[in-house]
Image (cartoon, coloured by chain):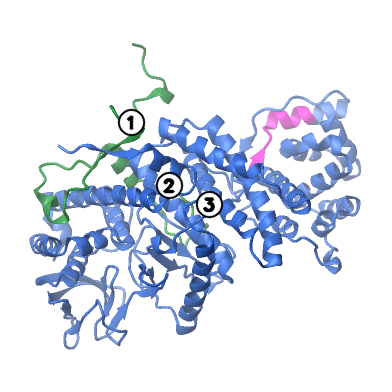
Chain colours: A blue, B green
Amino acid sequence: MYAPIRMPGPLFDEIAAGGGSPEAVAFLVRGERTRRLLLLRELLDRLDADPALLGPLDATAVWSALEAAAARAPGPVDDLLLSPQVGSWLAHTLRRLHGTASGPPLWADAGQLAAVAAAAAVHAGTEAELLLPARGAAVSLPALGMVRLPGPDGDDFHAVPAQARGGRITVHGPHGPGVTVRPLDAPESAHWMPVHRLGTGPGLPAVQLDDLDPYRDLDEPIAPHRLGPDELRAWHGLFREAVELLRQDGGAGPGGLRPEEISRIVPWQAKDGDAGLPVPSSGLSASTGDAFASMVIARPQDPVALAETLVHEFQHSKLGALLHLFPLVEDEERAELHYAPWRADPRHLPGLLHGAYAFVGVTGFWRARTHDADTGRRDRAAFLFALRRLQTRMVLRTLATRARLTVAGQRLVTRLTGTVDGWLREPVEPGALARARACAVSHRVEWRLRNLRCGEDERDRLAEAWRSGTAPVRGGEPLVVPGSRGYWQDDRGALFSVPEPDAGAASTADALLVAGNPEAARSAYAARLRGPGAPDPHVMAGWLLAHTALHPADRRLLARPERLAALLEAVEPARWTRAARWLAA
Amino acid sequence: MPPLAKGERALHQPVPAEGTPDHLESDLIDLASVRVADLRHLRTAPAGPRLLAELRRARHNAMGGSEPGRAE
């Protein structure tokens, strides 16, 4: 019987504070290896119990090939096991078998085990004869690349014979002769597409730029989509500059990142170009705990944005690995109720914890940028450092007071809070600090107006109290109504991020407000609110922000703006200021 | 003993391991010494209910979806 994994407290605390030395991250990787072994064994047991799951593939041959390769080359096969491709495939396939995922014919998903065995045989130089799953003319070898068979391509799944020997592999498709390649060193050709690699420095591991593997998204397999030469060049250039930036920061503290610890970047490719992206591409990224150190990223415009995204997503990976070792929040708490300042919609508490952990990294990243030589970058960094430390602290408070944290979870939240509280004591240029505070309030007010409603009873009693001239009734718990207006961007927040907006641009209500002209801003917002239809929450939030700038004593309205919105439904626009003053009093 | 309330259910709580005041003990068994080649010969290698429950929860792809990625 094996002993449980025991994580030294000091290593836990390094991760819990938002950073992590190479030793601390290596401990997480060790946990990931155990998890992958347990999942692989789970899959093998399932295949033993029902060999028909592999369809035309032979389970005995597959496992023999993997065992032989692992016996000869344990290190490379361990690396393969730990690759994001294998992690995502393994998890997806077990979900298929459990009925919580869908995908291609089940044998093709389960049969990717044969592709793992073939890749292992290539690494080890062992001999193997296997049937591999092919999608059209494409045969994927995890973390190595893709064999392109002769003949027409398509989306059909079929089994193709393959032989591995001495580091070469020969694959026979239904059309034309077999294709033989040496995947470890063969250059790109008509029949072989290697995984792209991004350098992180002399003698250091490269990062995969994966546009091929079927299991490169967060769950279901997708078709290969080779980057064009211009796009590939852009990625290389951006990544090189992002690495230079991250190297300046050290790497072990919160917000630092050693680029060589990233395993893979998957370019976010929308089905219909940028028009197919669910939101504007800037900052679009995602990751899954199934694939440690892997991240899906829409290519940003500049290396600073890429570096920030790398830090952000690696934080998710670290927390995902920690969650594999220890429960941090009890599982039942998955109701989407809570304010996450970096999102348009409400989140559940585990998601909030992920966000807080990621944004501690992001905050640390911008803190480091406040020392950059570039003045413009320094100004923006001061604003973002001040904003993110404030927002992250707010979420940590929610977690500490609302989440049922485990012992490890409490230790994590305490350490994260310690990091952010230390940052909150650091001086920030007053102008940037003021804009950050205003931006945080603006986002929160608009988020509440978009996602929360007063209960019907409270709304009716507020209206009645207003009409009768009595005191406003007390507020109850708001109702959470997420998604009723869809995704939104914080356009006003973007204006707050600029130190001195272009004077000529100060013509919109938002610009007037941000420029420090609340009187004109309130008039402009009011004019828009007088239009037909339900009030736009963005405009309503702006009106309230302008109103409280003119009447600072009414700032308490900002805490529950949905109450004002409910009241104003019953008040003609000419009396809104009076109604707001009455509600705040 | 009274029944456990919801917040007190029998969740594995990592605690400092015995004799070593500052270690946290996971509910995962440690397979660091197990080679991939030997995996099948282990008498038992239980993944554990928590690991499987977390793994089996449905996910969504990031690309081609209607929402930005959501970390779980």
**Nearest the camera: A375 or A30?**
A375
Determine whether the residue tagged by mark 3 lies in a helix, strand or loop: helix
Disc 1 chain ID: B
Label 1: how many residues lie within 10 Å, few (<14), some (14-19) or many (20+)? some
The residue shown at (32%, 47%) is B55
| Quadrant of the drawing holding the N terminus of chain A | top left
Query: Residue A13 in the image: x percent, y percent?
Result: 44, 40
| Quadrant of the drawing holding the C terminus of chain A | top right
The residue shown at (44%, 35%) is A409
Query: Is residue A383 on the magenta stretch?
Result: no
The residue shown at (37%, 70%) is A206
Left or right: A283 as drawn, with respect to A79: right
Query: Residue A233 in the image: x percent, y percent?
Result: 48, 81
> Hey, what amino acid is under mark 1?
His
Q: CA distance from mark 3 to mark 1?
A: 28 Å
Q: Which residue is mark 1?
A: B12
Q: Which residue is mark 3?
A: A361
Q: Which residue is mark 2?
A: A319
